[in-house]
Image (tube, grey):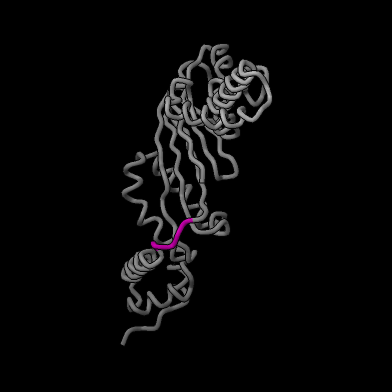
Amino acid sequence: MPLPVTTEQVKELRDATGISVMQCKNALTEAEGSMEKALAILKKTSSDIALKKSSREFGSGAVAIKIEAGKGVLVSLQCETDFVAKNEDFTSLLSKLTDKASTDGVEKMKTEAKDMIDPVIQKTGENIGLGDAYEIEGEILDGYVHNNKTAVIVALQGGNKELAKDIAMHITAMKPEYMHPNEITEEVKKTMTEIFQKEVASIDKPEEIKKKMLDGKISTYFKEKTLLDQLFIKDGATTISQLLEKSRAKIKEVKRYSI
């Protein structure tokens, strides 16, 4: 007859896994006191629970970045509610995934993510899943995270880390859809022209004036959507393009993600 599970064993297993006392006790009882078997049982249980919750939709999450030794990683983790997104187990998991992505690379992290996520699903009772994850390299890198919901990493050619961070903050606030004007397709230009034509058509002005108004609306719209044409949030008299020129810098790459 197996020996009864002791309080010390339950505490040791709980300290090792963070899973509830009753789940640890049940696993140890099923494992007849074997810590190794109990850990295996809890891992299987975590996987089973995760599978059952996998169809539940994500409604929240958090995002994190880590920049170190010429490499930046951006990792997003999804969950169902803001309550869990602020949970210590969830935020700790995101931190560990980000550290692993930084140390081992994003692809390696992805292969190990499920085993790291499943126990936290078991603890929180919510569906949790890895969102997008990016890796960016460069000599001059920095980034910005806003409210754990939006993150941006910017790599520059020239300039400095302070400039990279300023541009990352600007991108977070202004949400540009395009980096450069040449990224705007003819189809998009045509669609917006048709929309503004309808607005201008009802104005009681000569056609020549309407044409100037239309051109002005289209120009303003795309400048507000294009990073290099946007006015820098810290200096409303300077565009991002002018800011970069002043620092003799160019944007090499940008990674952005919002929950």
Towards the viewer: 14 or 61: 61
Quadrant of residue 47 within the rendered picture:
bottom left
Classify 166 as above or below 94: above
Residue 247 at what x, y percent from top left? 55, 13
- State the count of labels: 0
Pick whichever, 184 or 256, lies toward us: 184
Instruction: Determine the residue positioned at 38% across, 75% down.
Output: 28
The kind of secondary structure the magenta stretch mainly shows is loop
Whether residue 55 appears in magenta in the rendering, the answer is yes
The quarter holding residue 253 reads: top left
Q: Which residue is pictured at 31% across the width and 70% down the height?
A: 37
Extent of the magenta region: 54-58
Is residue 136 shown above or below 58?
above
* Residue sitting at x 43%, y 68%: 13
Residue displayed at 62% across by 21% down: 210
**220 to 9, vertically: above or below:** above
The residue nearer to you, when weighing 188 against 241, is 188
Q: Nearer the viewer, residue 31 or 174?
A: 174
